[in-house]
Image: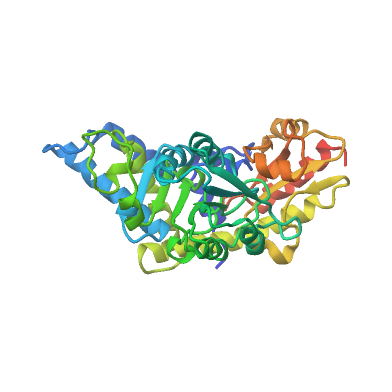
């Protein structure tokens, strides 16, 4: 069936502004009304701490378990015990880096790719500095725009303990073959930590199929509240040393979740999963919760592919414009709808400011993609103009974006 974009847009109050085009989605998506309402309802109704005998506390206990169980379904995890929920992907990565690397020895190696967002770089650089570890880098291929297994294999040694991989780039939009890269890393005896922040808004993660040990993503990038999710294999998570208070249980996921959880945001997270499931039902699909999520993602992705092709086709017709990423329309499946560009003679900031005046919201700069910016030889202070689409954008919006970029650079 035709993707019901009008129905989707009706569920997002922010999209009721006809003078706004949200093309800033890689930095954070808008939310359905039901997500915001779930947050408000929890704060105004059954709001308490965990572990009490009274009704509101018991309700929060149920919500806590439900949020982890449903997040596990979303990620393809074995159970909610494998899911750690925290304030952000970056905060979770910094937190878990201490446990993951606790038994590493000076001279042991962490391999990081040049596709990474700083959230999957900074924590490892810091722990490497503190513990005398060695950082080894893997460049992405300038032709395929991906990290190739052969390039990764060349950087692995007998001292490699951890490999950090980017699932989808927040600059180029390219999707890495994580299963193939994980296999190479595992053959070398290394743990694998995957940043799936930019992948999860467009394709449904499946940790079982990826062969990794850890995976992180951010709910506010896939139409939910400001939370980060971290998945880890249960046997591994149970074996790691938890940095926690003395009163905290040693059970999973408690041992890695410090302090009182953000219960109102857990309610919003559950409502986000409701959104995916309900849209799957609207698309005339049936089955399990994950089946319905998969149906939503499959339909959304096919629709987004069309938007991406239209956007790239329009932008490539502008003189002096360079797109940093896959532009071949036959390789749309190898990227998410995040398109970064520069135009000769025009700064990204100036272009973004001009678009903002026309109600088109895009990002400019390095966007915390330091390593891609450096590998591409781009000025860090300027970076790129980044246009990021989602399944609630329209073909008319894409046409307006292309026209506005052309006008902004005098094309």
Q: Quadrant of the N terminus?
A: bottom right
Q: Quadrant of the C terminus?
A: top right
Judge by depth and name the residue closer to the eye, 286 or 382: 382
- Residue 73's quadrant in the figure? bottom left
Where residue 200 appears, as percent x and y from the top left, is: 51, 53
Q: Residue at x 40, y 61 (%)?
A: 76
Where residue 117 appears, as percent x and y from the top left, is: 59, 43
Q: Is residue 93 above or below residue 330?
A: above
Judge by depth and name the residue closer to the eye, 386 or 393: 386
Judge by depth and name the residue closer to the eye, 84 or 156: 156
Q: Residue at x 55, y 53 (%)?
A: 199
- Residue 141's quadrant in the figure? bottom right
Q: Is residue 298 above or below residue 378?
A: below
Q: Is residue 293 above or below residue 219?
A: below
- Residue 208's quadrant in the figure? bottom left
Q: As drawn, is 276 to the left or to the right of 376?
A: left
Exactly how many numbered labels are in the figure?
0
């Amino acid at each position: 069936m035709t993707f019901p974009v009008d129905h989707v847009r009706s569920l997002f109050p922010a999209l009721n502004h006809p003078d706004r085009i949200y093309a800033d989605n890689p930095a954070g998506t808008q939310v359905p009304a039901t997500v915001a309402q779930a947050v408000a309802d929890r704060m105004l109704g059954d709001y308490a701490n965990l572990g009490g005998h009274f009704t509101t506390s018991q309700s929060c206990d149920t919500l806590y378990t439900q949020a982890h169980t449903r997040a596990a379904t979303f990620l393809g995890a074995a159970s909610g015990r494998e899911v750690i929920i925290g304030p952000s992907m970056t905060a979770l990565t910094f937190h878990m880096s201490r446990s993951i690397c606790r038994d590493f020895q000076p001279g042991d190696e962490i391999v990081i790719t040049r596709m990474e967002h700083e959230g999957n770089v900074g924590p490892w650089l810091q722990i490497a500095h503190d513990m005398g570890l060695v950082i080894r880098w893997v460049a992405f291929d300038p032709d395929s725009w991906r990290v190739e297994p052969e390039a990764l294999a060349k950087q692995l040694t007998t001292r490699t303990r951890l490999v950090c991989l980017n699932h989808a780039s927040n600059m180029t939009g390219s999707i890495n073959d994580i299963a193939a890269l994980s296999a190479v890393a595992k053959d070398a005896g290394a743990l694998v930590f995957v940043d799936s922040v930019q992948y999860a808004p467009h394709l449904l993660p499946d940790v079982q199929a990826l062969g990794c040990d850890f995976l992180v993503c951010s709910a506010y990038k896939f139409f939910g509240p400001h939370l980060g999710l971290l998945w880890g294999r249960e046997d591994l998570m149970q074996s790691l040393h938890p940095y926690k208070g003395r009163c905290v249980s040693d059970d999973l996921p408690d041992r890695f979740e410090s302090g009182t959880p953000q219960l109102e945001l857990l309610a919003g997270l559950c409502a986000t999963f409701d959104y995916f499931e309900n849209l799957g039902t609207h698309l005339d699909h049936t089955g399990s919760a994950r089946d319905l999520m998969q149906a939503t993602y499959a339909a959304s992705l096919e629709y987004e592919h069309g938007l991406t092709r239209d956007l790239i086709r329009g932008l490539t017709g502008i003189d002096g414009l360079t797109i940093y990423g896959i532009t071949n329309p036959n390789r749309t499946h190898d990227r998410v709808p995040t398109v970064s560009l520069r135009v000769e003679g025009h700064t990204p900031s100036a272009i973004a400011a001009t678009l903002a005046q026309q109600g088109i919201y895009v990002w400019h700069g390095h966007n915390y993609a330091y390593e891609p910016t450096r590998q591409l030889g781009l000025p860090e202070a300027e970076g790129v103009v980044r246009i990021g689409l989602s399944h609630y954008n329209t073909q008319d919006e894409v046409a307006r974006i292309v026209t506005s970029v052309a006008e902004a650079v005098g094309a």
